[in-house]
Amino acid sequence: MTEIKRGWNRRKTMVVLMAFSMIFLASVAILGHIFREEAMVTDFSRKNLAPCLQYPFGTDFMGRDMLIRTIAGLSMSIRLGLLTAFISAVIACVMGLAAAVLGKFADGLILGLIDLVMGIPHILLLILISFAMGKGFIGVVIGISLTHWTSLARLIRGEVLQLKESQYIRIAEKLGISKGKIAVKHMLPHIAPQLLVGLILMFPHAILHEASITFLGFGLSPEQPAIGVILSESMKYLAMGKWWLALFPGLLLVLTVLLFHYIGETLGRLTDPGHAHR
């Protein structure tokens, strides 16, 4: 009884921490969108100011407030991560269901495509797709969406193959229900928790890869207040002692990634019956 109570209290703590993480990330996304125009404002009379009470993250070489600029950049990364993770999850769901339901030929074809995508160095494939699509916001969205679905698709395929052996699926097949209806009505609800957790765990990967290719010059345009742009610009001034230009944006990027990862891991434990009293 005591062990069950401890497990319940631990689960409540996890839920509270997850809620705080979600509130923080939602606040950053909303505030960054609100202050997007202000993040672009330049004032050369205050350029390269060290962190102080008025400017907690300091200012950059164009006199822009680094706190507002960092929040705006994180906001864009979060919104882009949400969009690309959702598209990747939809692709993974369709591919995983199709591989497990449409027969051996479709299964082999989709597994071959998964192996092909996973066989190419991830960041290289992402850069190539983004560059081919003209870089910018659209190029980054397409690049990340087309390179992040493979692992989740494999997971969903495995789950669906197990479901196919269950008695109620076999009965539905004998009753003449179409494969499409079985997949949507009977299989999709069972894989929804794994799909949701996989979607959330794709957020940190999407955010980091967006920042990486933008940092390298193959992502978002330099005019946008993106974290990758901020970190790329700061490299020129680190040798001059302007450490705050990279430190605070980098720390907030790491915090954002860790919070998304924590939310995904926590949600996975809460939806797993095996962790019900742990």
Image (spheres, rainbow, N blue to C red):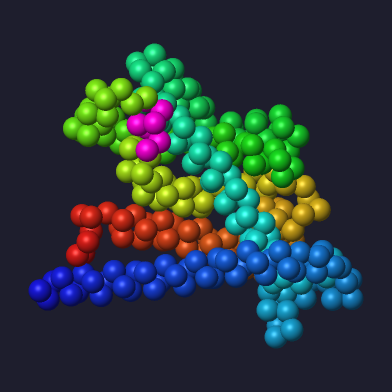
80 up-or-down from 25: above or below: above
| Residue pictured at 32% horizontal, 33% vertical | 160
Residue 186 shown in magenta: no
**Can residue 243 be seen here?**
no
* 242 lies left or right of 209: right
Q: Report the residue that reaches farthest toward the bottom.
A: 53
Dominant secondary structure (helix, strand or loop) of the stretch shown in magenta: helix
Q: Position of residue 67 (x, y in %)?
A: 69, 72
| Residue pictured at 31% horizontal, 73% vertical | 12
Residue 182 shown in magenta: yes
Q: Residue 26 occupies which quadrant of the picture?
A: bottom right
Q: Report the residue that reaches farthest toward the front.
A: 175
Q: Position of residue 141 (x, y in %)?
A: 64, 42
**Can residue 161 be seen here?**
yes
Q: Residue 224 occupies which quadrant of the picture?
A: bottom right
In the rendered image, the quadrant that contains the N terminus is: bottom left
| Residue pictured at 13% horizontal, 71% vertical | 3
Front one among 175 and 7? 175
- Stretch of the chain drawn in magenta: 179-185
| Residue pictured at 73% horizontal, 68% vertical | 34
Q: Position of residue 117 (x, y in %)?
A: 50, 27
* 59 lies left or right of 85: right
